[in-house]
Amino acid sequence: MNEQAPLRIVLAKVGLDGHDRGVKVVSRALRDAGFHVIYPGLWQAPEAVVRTVGDEDADWLGISLLSGTHLTLVPRIIDLLKAAGLDHVGVLVGGIIPEADIPKLHEMGVSRVFGPGTPMTDIITYLRSEGSRTHA
Amino acid sequence: MATAMDRKLWARWQEEIEKSPPPELPATTVSGVAIDPLYTPDNLDGFDYDTELGYPGQYPYTRGVHATMHRGRLWTMRQFAGFGTARQTNERFKFLVDKGQTGLSTAFDLPTLMGLDSDDPRSLGEVGRLGVACDTIDDMRQLFDGIDIEKLSVSMTINAPAAIVMAFYLANAQDRGFDWRKMRGTIQNDTLKEFHAQNEIYFPPEPSVKLAIDVVEFCAHHVPQWNPVSVSGYHIREAGSTAVQELAFTLADGFHYIDQTLERGLDVDQFAGRLSFFFNAHNDMFEEIAKYRAARVLWADRLRNHYGAKKESSWKLRFHAQTAGCTLQDKQPEVNLIRVAYQAMAAVLGGCQSLHTNSMDETLALPSEHAVTLALRTQQVLAYETGVTNTVDPLGGSYFVETLTRQMSEEARRYFERIDELGGMLGAIDRGFFRREIADAAFAFQREFDAGHKLVVGVNAFQEKDEKPLDILQIDLAVEAEQVASLNKVKRDRSAADLSRTLDAVRRAAEAEENLLPSLIDAARARATVGETMHALADVYGRCEGAVV
């Protein structure tokens, strides 16, 4: 892990889901903990998310979904990341994900799923311990 | 209020509490307001029963909007429902009526809420998932098929495309032979709170409000028993606001709708009595009760003294409450039943007119039949077993509750002043005031939670190792294909000439700044879809551009 440069993480709301309380709280908590956070706002298309990840040279992508569309949208984003040569970027999912779907997301390549009630320190500790796969 | 107090005894109590250990956790409300260990007549300096409380059904309505409140008539038990296709939701409606529910409440899916059709590429994966898909008047017909909508009151939660969905509803009702003047119900139609919190946004703020007021104006003339706006604090609170922010921002939205409707030349008494409200029922019982009481007082004061309304019905703030979805947890989900029961009791003690109790599985999915039945039973136990309906406003006169009610009113008034200073409602939206206030409050709560100052049972306290998952409702992925196929059939069978003629009329009416409902009703009958009609309006109004952060 590179100690000098802060980890760069894109946080994304995809699809039509407007529940943004969680993603905004996470944005602030990560920023306060010294991460470089890029949050482009609501209603991002999967293509736009992947473009942002590339343009911002992000180490991580955090996808926030509370509308139940994770099994449609997450694999789409992961495929687009691969197609763009960005498969070194770690993918996190936050929001409302039924227990039974979590192994499916892991299989698709998601590193961790953070559900409701997650303390911010859990996310921070996780990211710090994983660090960057880009600059490792 | 009597202030006769034995100072010696009071001093002794002071000494005793100073010696005793401080509370384990900070004694603050869920909104972070510090609460004293005891409230006494000292807190209610200058309290006057007649002007501050009065009698239920009388100004300023602190104790409730009806003389007998729930003793005379229970609140309406109204469970929000909608998923899949109109046919599936129609079945759920009939199931709920069969279980004793006394009103219907419709949840639409995200594409419908955002003004998109089921076959729009952005709708992929969302059709029928969080609510029912409604593309055309034919879906509306199916949704209420076999239901007597003159007898049952119907609520529809829809905002950006509310005028279009209302046109579907009215056209369908008329086609089925129902009398608009007898129909009762509510359309949420509150586009302002979308900009503060809920984020189902299509047009810029100004035309969004214009559309909402079209519904208010049309209903005032033609559908007089309908509530054309449900001014909603629920979503503001869910986005993380404090109780006072919920109260103040919601009432400020209501004032803006009144100002805009008055500009159309209506008298305040022609429509104010039909504006209804929708509040959250959160965890902190007394803070919530004070919030509802303060809301009634603030509204009555403004309507009577600022707007000069003469009719008492214009002064009365009537509200629906829903228990707080954001308090439900996915850990030990059965515990949600208990949260919901307390929240529901706060709403009832606060004098709600209708109530939705969340189902225990709603953090995980839309409610199963088992879960929704328990949620409804929670209300029935409250109504028929606990005795809380026997007397009106049983907490009236409580030193604590009256003090909180006063504090809430004062703080809300300070917010009204700040909004005015920012240039009124639209100016404050433009400056990002509401979103910033709400995000700050959400973050402050998260910090309290992370620090262990606020405990959530099963989450950061009293955790269980092995949890048994609930059986949850699965939405069949085939729903999307089924809905898109039926939409395609409607599009094939309709007259292209009628469609373009009626949509042109919608555009012309929008350009001429006429009330859109008549032309929207014609377009509904020509089978114009929600998405097509929104497009036609966007030709005139433009879209809300740019990222919403």
Image (cartoon, coloured by chain):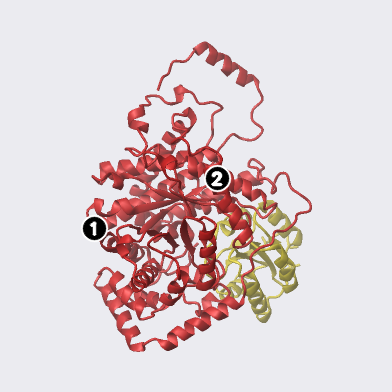
Q: Which residue position is annotated with label 2?
A: B343
- SS at mark 2 in the image: helix
- For the colour red, the matching chain is B
Q: Mark 2 packing: few (<14 Cα in 10 Å), some, or many (20+)?
A: many
Residue B246 located left or right of residue B522: right
**Quadrant for the N terminus of chain B in the image:** top left
Please state the horizontal and vertical placement of residue B111, each as a whole percent of the image: 49, 72
Q: Chain of mark 2?
A: B
Amino acid type of the residue that numbered disc 2 sits on in the rendered structure:
Gln
Please state the horizontal and vertical placement of residue B384, each as a whole percent of the image: 53, 43
- SS at mark 1 in the image: helix
The front one of B230 and B345 is B345
- For marks 1 and 2, give the CA distance: 39 Å
Residue A33 located left or right of residue B486: right
> Picture quarter containing residue B151?
bottom left
Please state the horizontal and vertical placement of residue B354, each as a whole percent of the image: 45, 50
The front one of B439 and B109 is B109
Q: Residue at x 36, y 65 (%)?
A: B208
Q: Which residue position is annotated with label 1?
A: B263
Q: Is residue B107 above or below residue B437?
A: below
